[in-house]
Amino acid sequence: MEYKLDRSVHSLLDPRTKLLLLFTSSVFVVGNAGEAWMLAFYWILVYLPVLLLFVDREWKTGIIAIVIYIGSYFAQRALQHDLTAVESMLALSLYIITKILPTVILARYIIKSTKVSEFLTAMNRMHISDKITIPISVIFRFFPTVVEESGSINDAMRMRGIEMGANKASEAIEYRMVPLIASCSIIGEELSAAAMTRGLEVGKRRSCIWKIRFRFPDWIVMGFCFVCFVWWGIGRFFV
């Protein structure tokens, strides 16, 4: 019987390309390297994670991100002169959103679209030590599991009539946060045990059913990242 692997679950980019893009976004969006010199690249890096969400058919999340970007940008433009203390705090919050949110969305996309086996295979081809890749692979499963556990706790609390209302706010925090904190500890231990059970620390080369290779979209994204650093270097050292 011939087994055909479903390639539809494959993400658009190679895990190595995703990490390079995340690093580039951290430098030029969060770190604001180059400032006005890198303005065009900055906006491309801001909206590129949204494009990746649309490719993965996450229309709702992508549209919400665009609305937040545009709203924060024009709100900052409106809060530029003669600010009160409250307006200054609001402007600072908006500035942080426009700087942090694109990279957070990109990190979310990477975690959601990358399988652990893909990530481990990609890191193995880069000759990265298992002492680094195994903890990161555990993190790849930790956050989605915590989000799922949080949703289950919220459903259980709603069934018991405990909502985030004014009269039961303290109960809602207690009945949600305490179980979630306890679950996080258990989840971490279980994921570590699962990693050992699957032989992730044997120190030998592992097989993978996914074909990890650079494709045309990867070369485009890597070329863009390379151009970002070259253009920044020109502005930093030659202009």
Image (cartoon, rainbow, N blue to C red):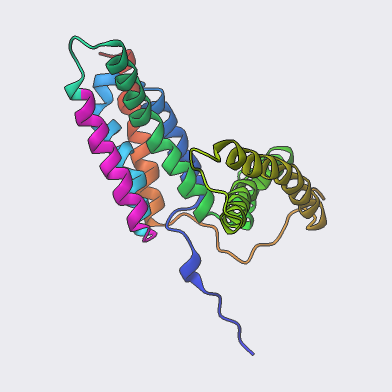
Q: Which residues are magenta?
A: 56-76
Q: Is residue 196 above or below residue 172?
A: below
- Residue 173 percent across, percent down from the top left: 60, 38
Nearest the eye: 35 or 190: 190
Instruction: Identify the residue at horizontal 33%, vertical 13% (top origin).
Output: 237
- In the figure, is residue 193 to the left or right of 164? right
Q: Is residue 34 visible?
A: no
In the image, residue 198 lies at what x, y percent?
78, 58
**Which quadrant would the N terminus be assigned to in this image?**
bottom right
Query: Residue at 74% of width from left, 38% of height from top?
Result: 131
Q: Is residue 48 visible?
A: yes
Seen from this angle, which residue lies furthest front?
Answer: 167
Q: Name the quadrant of the C terminus.
A: top left
The residue at the far bottom in this view is 1
Q: Is residue 6 above or below residue 116?
A: below
> Residue at 36% of width from left, 24% of height from top?
93
- Say whether residue 208 is left or right of residue 111: right
Return the x and y of residue 14 as percentages of the image width and height.
49, 52
Circle count? 0
From the top left corner, tell me how far across and down residue 15 is, in percent: 52, 49
Give the residue at x 17% y 12%.
81
